[in-house]
Amino acid sequence: MTFESRLTRSPDPFDTDRGAEARAQFSDLSAPVQGLINGAAGCSPYLSGLLSREADWIRPAFDDPEGAMDALLAEVAATPYDSLAPDLRCAKRRVALLAGLADLGGVWPLEQVTQALTDFADAAVDVCLKRLTAAHIRRKKLPGFTEDDAETACGMVALAMGKMGAGELNYSSDIDLIMLFDQDRLTEDTYDEARMGFVKITRLMTGILADVTAEGYVFRTDLRLRPDASVTPVCLSMGAAESYYEGVGRTWERAAYIKARPCAGDIHAGAGFIETLRPFIWRKHLDFAAIQDAHDMRLRIRDHKGLHGPLSLDGHNMKLGRGGIREIEFFTQTRQLIAGGRDPKLRVRGTKAGLEKLAASGWVPEDHAAKLYDHYRFHREVEHRVQMVADQQTHHLPTNEEGWARLASFMGRDVSGLRRELTDRIEDVHALTEGFFAPGHARTPKEDFGAEITARWPNYPALRSARAVEIFNRLRPEIMGALAEAAKPEEALLNFDGFLAGLPAGVQLFSLFEANPQLTRLVVDVCATAPALAAYLSRNADVFDMVIGGGFFSDWPGAQGLVASLTRAMSEAADYEDRLNMARRWMKEWHFRVGVHHLRGLIDATEAGRQYADIAEATIAGLWPVVVEDFSAKHGAPPGRGGVMLGMGSLGAARLNAASDLDLIMIYDADGVEGSEGRRPLATRPYYARLTQALVTAVTAPMSDGRLYEVDMRLRPSGRQGPVATSFTSFQDYQRTEAWTWEHLALTRARPIAGNMELGAEVETFRQELLRDKAGGESVLADVADMRARIAAAKPPQGDWDAKIGPGRLQDVELAAQTVALQSGSPAREIRAQLAAGVGSGRLSDADAEALSTAAGLFWQLQASARLLTGGELKPEELGEAGRRLILRETGYETTDRLLAAMGTVAETADAVISRLLSGAARETNDDKSQGSN
């Protein structure tokens, strides 16, 4: 498409004589294009000179500007060594003219203008590197290399930084480069001489690009973003740079690498280097400390440039000043730094793409992102016109009437309207960004309390650094005010004290609180209600990431959705150990979500139990292929059909509490295969035994991010004496001929959760067949009665508030439910379904089933709440007011006295039902009813 067909605007000529002179030179072109030339030349002496000098080149370019640009880039890439300097300067003039006119006429949007300037910069740097390395090879200044190596610049690479890296070069921009070389392409004997050659090539390239001659210049080139620029050579090895960033890299350098891009030379090596820096740039946790670093950086820039104070348009710096371009870029990049470690979608270079991704992920309101980019585009267009006047790298608005008149003409505006719009946009940018970098002051608490407790805070690990203290002091009024408003302020403060004492460090977390005030209220809620959850938070403060990372209050994804989520999270990890740590972080975040939802009444104990079980199932199912892959790398793939992991006990019944461990059984089918095939092959039986142990270790091992769960495998055939993994054939034989009643009871809740689910389906079919075969067994009631008596003797209840242990309480009811399920041959796993099976088979009356169901529900509510609140026993007198309220809310009673009385009544009724069941009384009663009805 031609220029004329896409013209949407045109500047007004400020200098009418100069404009008319340029227009006359192109009198053969269409009137609209002549009008553009008239305005451009009349506002910019620089463009006027380019139009005169490059008239023959620009004339055909008006017919196909993109084609002209492509042809120019191809010519640049073919530039011979001897004419680099003049040819690149000629190309720069033509790009500046084409891009300038396309910008002024609205032919190209801002993004296409800046990309064209960037594409030329890439091509200029690349051709310089390749021609200079080729020349050095010919002169034997790069030992060990041949002329073919010049195409990859012998391992040299230019990293484009800042606006060049993002494809956003401004009209008169300089270019920021970091020059590196790949030390792996050198030998010990050639290293020193080659390194000196690379340094010289860098200096020669900089001269070719930046020196001002009669032909102009190509790009002012800045190499100061390299590591420790005051003492390091202008080109350094990738290894040295990596060591620097890993050791002493700072937040501003992390931010700089968001836009970093290999643009010239050995692109592949450059991309590999940036990939090695990924953990440095993108932290695994939400990094809110970056906000303070960015804010400090902004203040230092303003101090250095003298840009503080209220807005004054005359001379205002559109890049660095209040409400300027840098504010928008800092806002975008800092948000990316905060969350990009966890959300790879945010790892984009451009400002537009960055704001769009942040909005899509919920980090920035969509309307804010749209406004900021609209302002950004306007700011950049103003910046371009200020620079086009004389091709100067300036960002300042005019300081006199003539300057404002010229700028207004350049934009086709009147001065007063332009000044009003600039003021409005600058102030709006400031309003949208300043609150993020400099949050408002916290409230003053209604009263001062807890001086004795707060006096010891300075000795805590989290408050040992000056920076942590500074941030916490800004937070303290808000925290103390919220604690003072709790139902029991002293209890809340005491629990917060425990939370604070357990924190290993404070800067990151306090920065997160400052940027997200809603978390202060959440911490107060937790501290006022659940000491155990508060202690958990102090050990695992990174779970706050999930609260503000999006999705914390979205619909529950279910077990399969969680498996997919865990798989995605682990795919970001570099190695096996990292995957296991990632799994731990993932589990803790979801575990915390369930606890908070339960605490706040968003879900009840029943739903919390299901969700905890979903998390555990997803953890095992997600880890299984990771463990198998790692194990197979050493010992070969699993022999035969593989294995399936069964969830037993509460996991099999899909109901866990906040402190549950996991009961597991491994069953495998070798399908006649005697062993594995790998570097260190194993016979089938030890293969699966060691594979199972590897999974258990992956779950239970304490690592830098803690452990996942405790695992109990005593429900496997023969208990502790049996192998940790059992073949399917042996499992079937054992269950049919050797298993005890308690093992058949355990099977009533067995459920395949991970591994080969086709094998799992066969195991499930066998389970159901076995339960049908064992239904009505003569010894079941006697065995269970004996088991019940031994349990009671071995582990008496821990007081009246023990929800789990004791006659008619949770464990007792679960045992009864499993008993009637086994007697009935029912495949049901959940208590209510098992009790219903007992009614259907005549083992229980409706009233008895209802009594047991009521007991199961009440005592589960208490057990689940106790594990959430305290992690152990339930002692209402030690819970605190908020904890007692949660217990009463969960159970529906008005006072703890009434609840305790109900516990006694419900347990007594359930105990009577269970005792009758196990003595045969329930069956006799049902038989009598049956006879009476005939």
Image: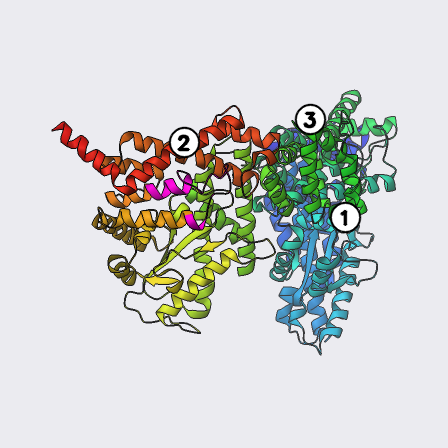
Q: Quadrant of residue 156?
A: bottom right
Asked if residue 606 can be seen in this view, the reply is no
Q: Which residue is mark 3?
A: 485
Q: Position of residue 59 (x, y in %)?
A: 66, 41
Residue range (magenta) = 793-816
Which type of secondary structure does the marked residue at label 2 adopt? Answer: helix
Asked if residue 788 can be seen in this view, the reply is yes
Residue 174 badge: 1
Q: Are marks 1 and 2 in contact (CB under 8 Å)?
A: no
Q: Which residue is mark 2?
A: 906
Q: In the image, is 268 to the left or to the right of 799?
A: right
Q: Position of residue 918 (x, y in %)?
A: 29, 42
Q: Earlier in the sequence, mark 3 or mark 2?
A: 3
Classify 10 Å Cα crowding around label 3: few (below 14), some (14-19), many (20 and above).
Answer: some
Q: Residue furthest bottom?
A: 189
Give whichever of 279, 797 is nearer the camera: 797
Specify the principal SS of the magenta part: loop
Amino acid at circle 1: Asp
Is residue 801 rendered magenta in the image?
yes
**Residue found 71% across the figure and 28% down from its top:** 484
Q: Position of residue 95 (x, y in %)?
A: 69, 46
Above or below for 364 versus 78: above
What whole-number distance in Å separates the C-alpha atoms at marks 3 and 2? 37 Å
Amino acid at circle 3: Glu
Above or below for 793 versus 895: below
Q: Position of residue 449 (x, y in %)?
A: 77, 30
Give whichever of 319, 809 is nearer the camera: 809
What whole-number distance in Å separates the C-alpha atoms at marks 3 and 1? 56 Å
Q: In the image, is 808 to the left or to the right of 74?
A: left
